Amino acid sequence: MDLFLQIWGGGGYLLAKILLSHAEGLEKDRPWRVAGWLAYIIGLPAWVMLLAGKHNWIAAANEAGGAPALVLGLALAWKGLDKAPALADWGVKIFTWIMIVLGLGYSVFFFGGITAFSQILELGVTAGFLLGTYLLAKKKPSGWLFFALMLCSMGTLMYLQGKTILIFQQAISLVFVIRGFVKGVSRTKTAKKQ
């Protein structure tokens, strides 16, 4: 089951990064963004199961808490919008913070504090994932930098847990994250000149 979850979650997230990084800089980016956000949503349940199964409560809550941001990204891409309605934006932020607090609180309770290196890595994953998805949903290139933090933190966590497929998935994803960042910065500079 573990191998299946690694392939499912890792494949979904890798495909999402490939599609979203390809969308950067394209004039007609809508189908690529829609497909990218869908791939994230498809891969999400596997990641939550993998992380919760290893008692990575902060990261598991982080992934679950990111679901509304993924749906927001999909909705914005589907409608071709650059900005979310204020109420939807507010709702995503509130849910995200609630999940962070719940995950962190349970992890502190479970481990008796922040006592494990894995918890520090989970905090890096949390900051990278939630801020990255939120900023990318709004087409902000800085979201890619937070994804790089997430990938490095998650790759290290997966290394410590012996999840070989996910280690490679994180490393390959980093290539597409860097590509997406470079293209996103270029897109932003081009838009400012016009």
Image (cartoon, rainbow, N blue to C red):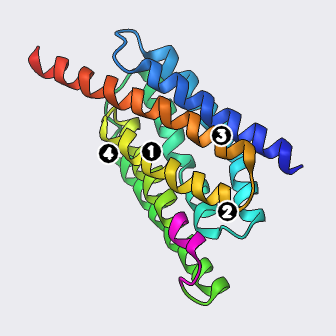
Q: Which residues are magenta?
A: 114-122
Q: Is residue 76 visible?
A: yes
The disc labelled 4 sits on which kind of residue? Ala
Q: Is 121 in the magenta?
A: yes
Quadrant for the C terminus in the image = top left
Residue at image point 48% right, 29% down: 176
Which residue is under mark 3? 168
Distance Cα–Cα, label 3 vs label 1: 16 Å
The disc labelled 2 sits on which kind of residue? Leu
x%, y% of residue 114? Answer: 53, 82
**Label disc, if present, on residue 115 of the rendered structure:** none
The disc labelled 3 sits on which kind of residue? Phe
Which residue is under mark 1? 147
Distance Cα–Cα, label 4 vs label 2: 40 Å
x%, y% of residue 66? Answer: 53, 51
Contact, mark 1 vs mark 4 (Cβ under 8 Å)? no
Which residue is under mark 4? 86
Q: Secondary structure at mark 1?
A: helix
**Label disc, if present, on residue 160 of the rendered structure:** 2
* Label 4 vs 2, first from the N-terminus: 4
Contact, mark 4 vs mark 3 (Cβ under 8 Å)? no
Image position of 151 (left or right of 138):
right
Q: Is 171 in the magenta?
A: no
The disc labelled 1 sits on which kind of residue? Phe
Question: Quarter of the image holding residue 147?
Answer: top left
Q: Nearer the viewer, mark 1 or mark 4?
A: 1
Residue at image point 74% right, 52% down: 163
Q: Secondary structure at mark 4?
A: helix
